[in-house]
Image: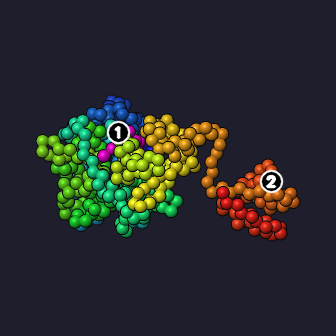
Amino acid sequence: MKQADIIKKMCRNELTQTDVKAICKFRQFSSPQSASAEIVETMITSDVGLKSALNSLTREEVLMLHFLLVQNEPVDISAFARISNQEGYKYGTFTQQYQKVFQDIKQRFIRKGLLAFCEGPAELNKKTKLERICLLVPGEFQAHLPGMFERPITSDQKGNVSEDRIRKLLAGIGRQDGKPLGQDSAFSIDQDGCLKIGNSSFRISNLESWQYRQWKTEAAKDMGFAAHFYSLDCPSALKVLFAGLKPDEWIAPEQLKPALDLFCTFRTKPDIDRVCHLGWEMGILETAAFEAVTCYRLHRRMGAPSGDVPEKHYVTDPDNACIDFNKIPLTVLAQFSKMARYRVENKQIFAAPDPVMMGRHLEEIRDTPWLFRLIHHLPAFKKVFQQLEKNRGNEIVHRNLLVAQIKHIGLKASLEKALSNEDVLFLPNGFIAFPKGLENIIENAVVQQGFAVKRVTP
């Protein structure tokens, strides 16, 4: 159900007058005398009285609101059993197990105007009203929630980042003539010369997704946790918790444990220090020591190259555009891969400018300082860039587009009629342009008219 529908049904069908008065008083919507369900429906997602209501919560309750927002959809009352000490019969019916939990949550969240709920649609596996109750935190509250940690360490200290695993795989491309290094390697140069992560282009977003998948795989070894409908696995929970830190905040593994106990359902407690260290090894987390305590935060990689590393550090042969994949900054490599195709020779990686790729991303990168420094360091790229700048606004470069010339007027007229429904452009002087996918169709049409096809290779 959508948030607006849940709030509407709650205010019109679910709330008692006692509930309405409590919400209006706690959120400072109105006096008890003028409290109404209409006021609650109109104002519950506003920030009126929200700060004081949130400040009344315990740390565990604040974490619960963060946890609910991570779900991205309404939950049933069973999700709250993790913070309620009012759980009923362990092996009874759903109502026997969670009726007291619902009453507890009503006092702690609903009557404070911090939670919306209503009875959801009937389902075969949800026979009682309590089973059908849907609860959610209005999305507007997210920006106002207190932090998930009481005393994170605040410091502008630069963190230590590990790229060893990525660099090893990138260096392996040269040793294997562009092919993946072993079956588990995700990095390769495909037959078109494009740098790939699996089947995806080498982009920072794709790289981070790959790192995260590797972290989950490595962390799952030796870690026992029970899957629960409303639980996250440990790396997923850690990613959410670290994302909640401010850019200058750090957290120690020991401080993560209360939040992890709420976000996850562990069968056996994981070694949080080990899981965090794995995140650092994968390049997802950065680390710093404060008073001999190792702390972590997310590695916030900038999307655009910073320009801190000079080109001569990773371009070993400017004239031939030989690139050292072990030294080139990853942000530069991601941007560079948008305009270059690679080849491997004698265990070295060479880049060649691709006019189509450069033209496609020209507006995105043309005014960036790193690009000007890089192309002036690489003559081949400088030449293509200057040509693109010269033709900017006057020329469109296509890939997979074929051009043919028809010298017979009758054949041209026949093809115009036969190919009227196809993506064929008839040009002056007998030329036609068409997508490569229509090549066979056009050749067959020419042959059927009794003409021969002559191919000219550039």
Of 290 and 312, the residue lying toward us:
312
Q: Give the amino acid type for the residue marked by disc 2 in the picture.
A: Gly
Measured from the top left, where is residue 213 in percent x and y? 35, 59
Q: Position of residue 229 (x, y in %)?
A: 33, 61
Is 363 drawn above or below residue 99 in the view shown?
A: above
**Crowd around label 2: few <14 · some 14–19 · many ≥20 (10 Å):** few
From the image, tell me which residue sits under label 1. 308
| Pointer 2 with pointer 1, Cβ within 8 A | no
The foreground one among 148 and 175 is: 175
Which stretch is magenta? Answer: 299-308
Viewport quadrant of the C terminus: bottom right
List x then y, in percent, for residue 295.
Answer: 20, 46
Residue at point 29%, 54% (across, down): 164
Residue 368 located left or right of residue 450: left
What distance separates the C-alpha of mark 2 from that of mark 1? 54 Å
Q: Residues within 10 Å of mark 1 (few under 14, many from 20)?
A: few
Q: Residue at x 44, y 59 (%)?
A: 344
Give the residue number, with chain letter if any, for mark 2: 430
The total number of labels drawn is 2
Q: Which element type, helix, strand or loop, lies under badge 2?
A: helix
Taking the magenta stretch, the answer to whether it contains residue 208 is: no
Q: Earlier in the sequence, mark 2 or mark 1?
A: 1
